[in-house]
Amino acid sequence: MLKNWIRLQAEYPCLYFVADWHALTTDYEKPGDLQQNCWDMVIDWLAAGVDPQQATLFIQSQVPEHAELHLLLSMMTPLGWLERVPTYKDQQAKLADRDLGTYGFLGYPLLQSADILIYRARYVPVGEDQVPHVEFTRELARRFNHLYGREAGYADKAKAAVKKMGSKKARLFNELRTRFLESGDGEALKRAQALLEEQQNIPRGDRERLYGWLEGSGRKILVEAEALLTQASKLSGLDGQKMSKSYGNAIALREEPESVAKKIRTMPTDPARVKRSDPGTPEKCPVWSMHLVYSDGEKKKWVQQGCTTAGIGCLDCKQPVIQAIQAELAPMRERAQAYLDDPTLVKNIVADGCEKARKLAAETMRDVREALRLNYA
């Protein structure tokens, strides 16, 4: 995930935040370590290569607009939408030792959606397991825009906004819109959207109206973001399940070499390999998911051949992963030391990030309050 973040920060304006409110959905009874866990997480990101000069780093709870949007979205979110999110029942089964019978846990996906929608994000970098959450967010944005996007005088305001593009571009935009609405011409829709993106002199409110006007809907106040899958979209934990600190099956980014080696050596493997001489299937082994991330083509071929023919044992297969992970984590521990020695470095980075994030969030909430007629003035 962090490798993906580091790549994306050079390509897009990115916002990366510590989800401390989300942490309370499964650990509300024990908030004692919450703050330290947050600082440790930011240090991990910085040590891995996330650059605060390129990306905005902040802490969720320090941008209260997240909570306001979450509250307002809860007014229009059908209960059944929350109950059908795949991870809801899955986590209830896996975290049976915790009290998950709370609104906070049920509303977790809704808060997650608010985290995305508050910044009008175009893309959300996620793993495979989070794609349903992004789709849920898209449905919410669609519902919100449908309910509140048709303000009084919407059509007249949209037509006035088209004229701001200039006569030539306005005429082309209207032609493309007609082609899309009358015949469903997808290419015409893409060209019109590209034309809109080029317009620098149109205010945000008018731009939102035009995106909706183009598709025959209302003003697009909230943006339907798309999932941007990581290259390795799913990495199994030490037990073969989803890797998560909550499940106790993860390796920390600054974990000591001896601990890393011990955890990987004791990982379960393909259950068909009861004896050393039994052939196995790499795709059924959690260790293989790590080879997909840490091994080159030649090493993967060696694993495939050795496992399926019983030419190598499971410990032989695990050793290259141990070495690769240890090699990757060693410089992270070294880079992290500067932040551990001077915690104010981290706090200043986060304070700057929170200020930038709040400015963006405030713009969205101004439009949301206006749509809901909550802009008392």
Image: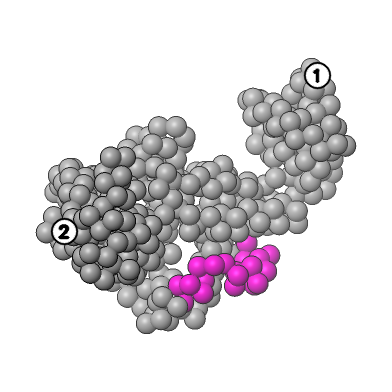
Residue 275, can we see it? Answer: yes
Residue type indicated by callout 2? Ala
For numbered disc 2, what is the local secondary structure? helix
- Residue 163 in percent (x, y) is at 80, 25
Q: Which residues are magenta?
A: 72-92
Which of the 4 image quadrants contains residue 143?
bottom right
Q: Residue furthest top?
A: 168
118 vs 224, nearest the viewer: 224
Number of callouts in the render?
2
Please give the name of the residue rendered at 41% of the width and 54% of the height, measured from the top-left corner.
Answer: 234
Determine which residue is flagged by label 2.
Answer: 261
- In the figure, 125 relative to 176: above or below? below
> What element does badge 1 sit on?
helix
- Residue 20 locus on image (x, y percent): 39, 62
State how far apart marks 1 and 2 are (Cα).
67 Å
Q: Position of residue 25 (x, y in %)?
A: 44, 71
Q: Is residue 127 left or right of residue 263?
A: right
Q: Quadrant of residue 268?
A: bottom left
Question: In percent of the image, x 42 and y 44: which residue is there?
Answer: 231
Residue type (three-letter) at the residue carrying disc 1: Ser
Counting from the top left corner in percent of width and height, residue 289 is at 35, 54
Q: Is residue 135 magenta?
A: no
Q: Residues within 10 Å of mark 2 (few under 14, many from 20)?
A: some
Q: What residue is pinned by disc 1?
A: 167
Q: Does residue 245 appear in the picture of this structure?
A: no
Pointer 1: residues within 10 angstroms few (<14), some, or many (20+)? Answer: few
Q: Are marks 1 and 2 in contact (CB under 8 Å)?
A: no
